[in-house]
Image (cartoon, helix red, strand yellow):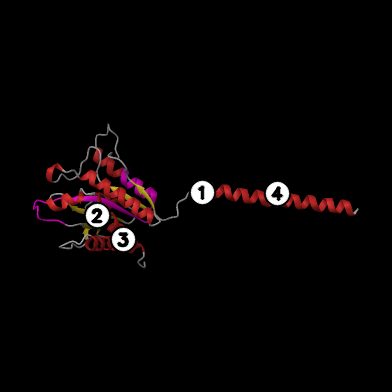
Amino acid sequence: MKKHIAETFMAVLLILCFWVLARQAAEVSADLNEPKSTGKVIVVDAGHGGDDPGMIGIGSLEEKGINLEIARRLKKSLEKAGYSVVMTRETDAGLYDEDSHSKKSQDMQRRIALINETEPLLTVSIHQNSYQDPSVKGPQVFYYEHSVQGEKLAKALQESLNTELSVERPRSAKANTTYYLLKRSEGVLVIAECGFLTNGEEAELLQQEAYQQKVADALTKGIINYLAMPD
């Protein structure tokens, strides 16, 4: 009788052990298959690309390439800071079909669709500026006029760019109601014009890797400062 009870107890104990191990294995499997996103996702948009060169500056300098270089560096800087980054483009290609009758419209629509589907903490669209007066220079950040958070982010980035790049004539973040990305984004989005390709000094700097990294680091610092602000 005692032997039977002992055998029954051992059988139950063995079944319980198998059940515990199975539960643990299932939890490990779920962890491995679960997305690694921490919820700290930022979208970095490199403006233009492909058939769309963007602004053409001194010496036929095209905006699209500089946008992409700064965007790549910004991605790396943000990842070092612990954020996950989604790029709208990572090569010299637009977000359109080659046979599209309206490549620009399709490109912009697809950027917005990607941003809205990602639901990021924020989006920074990288661009370069131009002006008829070649003496005009300096970074400037644009935000949608009716976005409170967009204004806060733009001001944080503008302040960081002005400080980290030692801008001679610091600009202020500027409201806008016409830019497609600003109007259509469902989340917080700003456009960072990193400099003027029509200014000889700034155009030269924006082609240098060290300065591109400096811009990326300034944007990263501004983003971190913004995310640390109370709601």
User: Is residue 135 one of those drawn in magenta?
Assistant: yes
Marked residue nearer the N-terminal end (1 or 3)? 1
How far apart marks 1 and 3 lie (CA) works out to 30 Å
Q: Which residue is mark 2?
A: 192
For the question of whether residue 97 can be seen, the reply is yes
Marked residue nearer the N-terminal end (2 or 1)? 1
Marked residue nearer the N-terminal end (4 or 1)? 4
User: Is residue 138 one of those drawn in magenta?
Assistant: no
Q: Which residue is mark 1?
A: 34
Q: Which residue is mark 4?
A: 18
The disc at residue 221 is: 3
**Amino acid at circle 3:** Lys
Image x and y of residue 205, in percent? 18, 52
Image x and y of residue 102, in percent? 24, 37
Query: In which quadrant will I find the C terminus?
Result: bottom left
Mark in front: 2 vs 3: 3
Q: Dot 2: few (<14), some (14–19), or many (≥20) neighbours within 10 Å?
A: many
Q: In the picture, residue 219 is in which quadrant?
A: bottom left
Image x and y of residue 195, in percent? 19, 53
How far apart marks 4 and 1 lie (CA) works out to 24 Å
Q: Is residue 52 left or right of residue 13?
A: left
Q: In the picture, residue 167 is in which quadrant?
A: bottom left
**Amino acid at circle 4:** Phe
Mark in front: 4 vs 2: 4
